[in-house]
Every structure is written in structure tokens, then in C-alpha cells.
Amino acid sequence: AARLGDSWTIDVINEATRPLADVLTVACVAMGLERVIIIGGFALELGARYLDILRKQLTNSGGLGTTRFGLDAIVSLGNGDEACLHGAAAFARSGVLEV
């Protein structure tokens, strides 16, 4: 229904996405995150439509709309279920943790 643009469904997704936007705002501001990659079947299935909803909610929650990177650069979709593994590998290679 969301892919077809059903207004009731889009409204439900908007409301359900608000808590995620609030948490992401706090996490980005508190930890100085420059990029957040959204993964998961629901988000990936809706694609750009979900990103538009999430970015709207992030703008409404405040805090990220004034960052130097902009919402398009901060929030993007992953390209599969292994995005978190790639991020963990990059973190491990960064040398922050001693192994």
C-alpha cells in the first residue's frame, strides 16, 4: 500500500518513524555521527519513499537540519543486509580497538 501511495498507510509510517527520527537526532548530535545507513527489509523495500519520510521526521525533530553535511549526506539506505558487517569491519580496521 505504501508503494502505491496510500495516504492512510503513509500517515501510519510517518507516525511510526517519528521515534526513530528522535533517537537518530540525539545519537547524531551527541556522538557527532556524520553518516547513518538505514538497513532492513521494510526500509529497503520502500526505498526513496522511506528516506523521504525519515528525513521529514528528522527535520521536524530538529537538530540535524542545520548540520554542515545536510540530511541527504547523513541518512542513506544500505545496499543489503551486510551493511552493518561492513561498518563493523571498517571500525575494526580503524585501529580504535586493540585486538
Image (cartoon, rainbow, N blue to C red):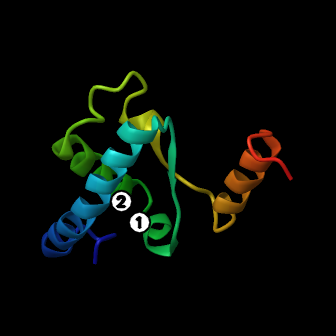
Foreground: 7 or 70? 70
As helix, strand or loop, the secondary structure at mark 2 comes to: helix
Tell me, yes or no, whether the two marked residues, 1 and 2, touch with CB atoms within 8 Å: yes
Which disc, if any, is residue 58? none
Which disc, if any, is residue 46? 1
As helix, strand or loop, the secondary structure at mark 1 comes to: helix
Which x, y percent locates residue 36? 49, 47
Which x, y percent locates residue 87? 68, 52
Label 1 is placed on what type of residue? Leu
Question: Is 44 rendered above or below residue 89?
Answer: below
Q: Residue at x 51, y 40 (%)?
A: 35
Q: Residue at the top extreme?
A: 68
Q: Is residue 68 left or right of residue 79?
A: left
Q: Is residue 16 left or right of residue 70?
A: left
Which x, y percent locates residue 97? 76, 47
Q: Residue at x 82, y 47 (%)?
A: 98
Alpha-carbon span between mark 1 and mark 2 = 5 Å
Foreground: 7 or 54? 54
Which x, y percent locates residue 24? 36, 51
Question: Is 68 rendered above or below residue 61?
Answer: above
Question: Is 96 rendered above or below residue 69?
Answer: below
